[in-house]
Amino acid sequence: MSPRTREAPRLLLENAYATYPHANAYYGDGGRWVALGRADGVDEIVGVEWDASGAGGGEPEALVSAAFLAEASGLDGPAWSPEEPTRSVPWFDVALRSQTLVCARGGALIAVELAASTRCPRVAYRSQDGWTLDGLAGVAPGGRTAVVAEEREGVHRALLVDLRDGSSREILRHQWHANHVHFAPADPSWIGYAHEGPATAVDDRVWGWNPSGAPAGRSVVDQHALSDDPPSAVALGHERWMFHDLGAVVVAYGESPAGPRGIYEVFVDGRPPRLVSAGERDWHVGISRDGRRLVVDTTGPADAPGRGWQDAGTASSLVLIDAATGERRTLAEAGFIAHPYHPHPSFTPDGRAVVFNLVERDAAGAVVRRGAAIVGVDPRGAG
């Protein structure tokens, strides 16, 4: 097979970032726009048109203004910037069918209808009675319901929020840190969430909730059963529930004490987990809407010896994976700094491109450019 020319990434918006990789950020006709967060000392959510051919771009449109975010959240102090790299940022999720955007910020769940002729962000829910709202919330494909996570005195719970009237209903509660809540696109009666904590210490990371199949929540995968080195468990994380099948793709980190490491599919209907593709440096994972391709970012260059964070430096690769064969091909080099500038790749709705966070450095290692970028995907597959 003849070698392929690697396409250079194109910056969509400088000093901006893509949302969390288990969320959706695409909206508009055919998903031709992508929501991004600003990261230049201002908290704001904006949208830009993308186009894999290079024709998209232009001036961003405001989706949730800095003024509204500040007033609704009640957060004081400076926003994220390279000088304030430990500050939190707004994360957001867009409903797959209705284009309702939600964002959990401070104690408020913010909602805005992106398809409306006049966009009017509003506070749809506010935490009460000492509960602290987690920064990652999800919205159902139809846009009527959101899921949020809250914590109070070491107790963690998840709530369904009716975005029409702000009413809420607790659906689960744990004595451990439960977060990363998001609806399963293939069947939104299922909600995926995580047992948060150090990946090498948590052996039941991936959980799902369903009103009949798992009303108290249940662990989706036995990490000890995956292991090639019992009694150690394979360390999993950064799960993303799939569009085309009821289950999730999940990363077995390079730091895992046992293997096989790489990307797995896990399911809720009794099917055994499947190792899609072995890898020693996988970090976050995205999947195409049809399930045929995955994309991962890596801890260190994809072709570097070692695994996990060994000699990772500040480099990261974007790697395309064929879901049927496990074959891999490097798409681009990304780099990284602190959140929100992990690469966090996601496929555009048509699967023709990947949006991610790009960090570029000079020869001395100083960051010279950062922002949300896009790179095209060769339709001939990963190999």
Image (cartoon, rainbow, N blue to C red):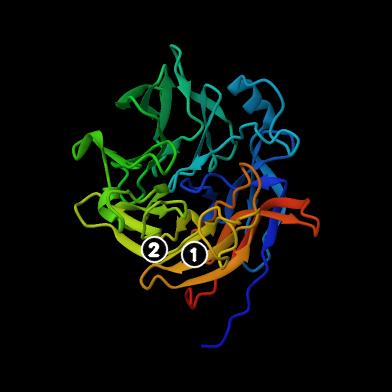
- Mark found first going from the N terminus, 1 or 2: 2
Relative to 317, is 140 above or below? Answer: above
Q: Which residue is mark 1?
A: 351
Residue 248 screen position, x and y as percent: 35, 52
x 26%, y 48%: residue: 222
Rounded to the nearest angstrom, the CA distance separating label 1 from label 2 is: 8 Å
Query: Across the whole image, how many numbered discs are drawn on residues?
Result: 2
Which residue is depicted at the point 56% across and 61% down? 354
**Whole-percent x, y for residue 105 in the image:** 55, 28
Amino acid type at circle 1 is Gly
Confirm whether residue 124 shows in the render: yes
Name the residue located 68 percent from the left edge and 65 percent from the top edge.
Answer: 55
**SS class, disc 2:** loop
In the rendered view, would you say 311 is above or below 164? Answer: below
At label 2, the amino acid type is: Asp
The residue singled out by tag 2 in the image is: 290
Q: Say above or below: 68 vs 199.
A: above
> Pointers 1 and 2 in contact (CB under 8 A)?
yes
Instruction: Out of 313 and 236, give the one closest to the viewer.
Output: 313
Tell me residue 275's x, y (percent): 34, 62
